[in-house]
Amino acid sequence: MHTVNQVVLFGRIGSDPEHRIAPSGKEITRLSIATHRSVRDGDTWQQKTDWHRVVAFERLARQAVECLKKGDQVAVVGQLRQNHFTNREGQNRSLVEVTASRLCFVPNRQPPRSTSYEGEPPEGRRLRQAHTDKGSKTGAIQTVDSEEIHPSSTPS
């Protein structure tokens, strides 16, 4: 039987990314991502916030710490991982986090409004710009892929 472990999140960074180097020399960046969902409470709907721990390694870790800050929007693609550990009080604990394989940095500013669409809606122009200006920091969505991550190579 085949299984799938893939997570896609789109939210905002809750605090500046935390970057460190593991004793093995591997670069690690941790992110806290907030997403929202609607919950029915009687006759009304309320917005609830969920917080997600995301970890990125090596090249993706460097890109995240260089390009992201608190409040930025980001899309994350990755896998759920559960880590088990013993805390300082000797209690066994577990922590679920997303190991990122791709980050899409979403610009915070709105694209300039134009009354001349040149035959296509502004969304189409923006998507084409995102694909042609991937490395640009001028408002295009920037996508960064990680190198392939093997469970045996990730630091604990």
Image (cartoon, grey):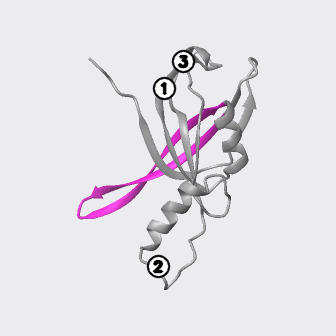
Give the mark nearest the N terminus, 2 or 3. Answer: 2
**Is 22 situated left or right of 80 in this image?**
right
Q: Which residue is drawn at 46% across and 45% down?
A: 9
- The residue sitting at the bottom extreme is 115
Q: Start and end of the magenta stretch? A: 29-57
Q: Which amino acid does label 1 sit on?
A: Arg
Residue hosting label 3: 151
Q: Do the residues labelled 3 and 1 touch (CB within 8 Å)?
A: yes
Classed neighbour count for the residue bearing mark 2: other residues with Cα under 10 Å, few (<14), some (14–19), many (≥20): few
The quadrant in which residue 144 appears is top right
Going 65% across and 49% down the picture, which residue do you hit?
Answer: 15
Residue ID for mark 1: 81
Q: Mark 2 points at which residue?
A: 118
- Which label is found at residue 145? none
Q: Which residue is drawn at 61% across and 20% down?
A: 154
Near-viewer residue (42 or 99) = 99
Looking at the rendered structure, the kind of residue marked 2 is: Glu
In the rendered image, residue 36, in percent from the top left (x then y), is placed at: 43, 54
Magenta stretch contains residue 53: yes
Q: What element carries label 2?
A: loop
Residue 90 placement: quadrant: top right
